[in-house]
Amino acid sequence: MKARIVFLPGDGIGPEVLDEARLVLNEIERAFGHSFEIVEGEIGVRAITNSGDPLPDTTRDLCMSGDAVMLGAVGGPTGTSYNGRRPEAGLLDLRTLLGNYANLRPVVAPEALAGHSPLRPELIRGVDLLVVRELLGGIYFGKPSDTIDGVARDTEVYSEHEVRRIAVTAFTTARLRRKKVTSVDKANVLESSRMWREVTTEVGKEYPDVELEHQLVDSCAMLLITQPTRYDVMVMENTFGDILSDEAAVLAASLGMLPSASLAGLPGNDSKGKPRKVRGLYEPSHGTAPDIVGTGKANPIGTILSAAFMLQYSFGLVEEANAVNAAVNGVIEAGHRTADIAARGAGFSTTDHLTDLILDRL
């Protein structure tokens, strides 16, 4: 098959890890006879520097011309603006442009890394959960959002339609897993959360084979660490999903291990049982990590697994995605580690060396 993939390297370690994903895609091309045209655009700090816009029109047009988009990372030091523009705004605008309302973040604790998490191994063994985060609503997008006369305002806004479609994504996905959905909210305080709980409950009635439980976000934050194996699919609004999915990274030993897919439709199979192709934005869950740029310490696994997501969800290439996943798992099981998952004081594989090991297995 032929596909056009838009690469947005972005900032910090984004270009480094995206280069490693490119090598993996090149190997998939060779091994399976596909043709991937990879084109690059600017986003974030570099885009502001060159054009004054964190998501310039040239990048917008490029993204709309592609079959899928892969992102490295976006942002500078926390709270930093450049020429009055915040680089992170480019990512929010990109998600809106592509209509990617569903963010999927799987968290799996590999047995080989059970001793590398700060949690006791017996707590994380068997962890296999999926955070389904609503991506286009909530306080990140609500208006008004401003600071006037020393008073700052951000607004939490959700419609029933937005809640319903992300709930449908969660329940549909749960049917392909262990048939349990945990909906996370703050219904004891927030009106938007009370509506979220009502709509999610209504959608749950359409999936009688899937168990639904509701949890308040504060108690969920505790249980996610103390009882992580209780979770299968977790669905939540934008801000809660951002925070809890990063918290869950400790279960997988490092944020650098986690991929993500942001989709404008439902993954799964069509009426003929073939993988449904959806337009997506694929990126690692980690940030720009400016402190390790150029050191060889960046973990490319989250980005490489995001490429596997793309192969499956946007192109329907399940065998190829499985091959990438198997290669990554094989390298981890063989004991190879980047700096973030290496034992204290132990040696580690550099970014490009770990990718070479994955390529060898492919």
Image (cartoon, rainbow, N blue to C red):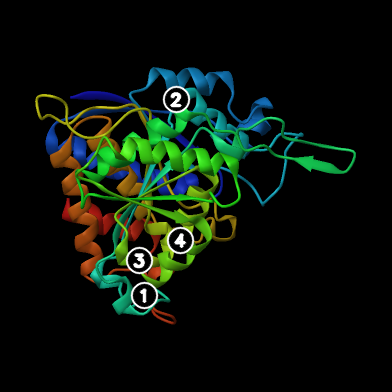
Distance between the alpha carbons at the discs numbered 1 and 3: 16 Å
Image depth: mark 1 or mark 3 in front:
3
Disc 3 crowd, CA 10 A, few/some/many (<14, 14-19, 20+): many
- Picture quarter containing residue 168? top left
**Mark 1 → mark 2, Cα distance in angstroms:** 37 Å
Q: Which residue is mark 1?
A: 116
Label 2 and label 4: CA atoms lie apart by 30 Å
Image-quadrant location for residue 250: bottom left
Q: Is residue 259 above or below residue 39?
A: below
What residue is at 37 percent from the left and 58 percent from the top?
257
Question: Closest to the observer: 236 or 129?
Answer: 236
Count of labels in the image: 4
Return the mark for residue 220.
Answer: 4
How packed is label 4: few (under 14 Cα within 10 Å), some, or many (20 or more)?
some
Disc 2: which residue: 98
Residue marked by disc 3: 228
Q: Is residue 76 left or right of residue 95?
A: right
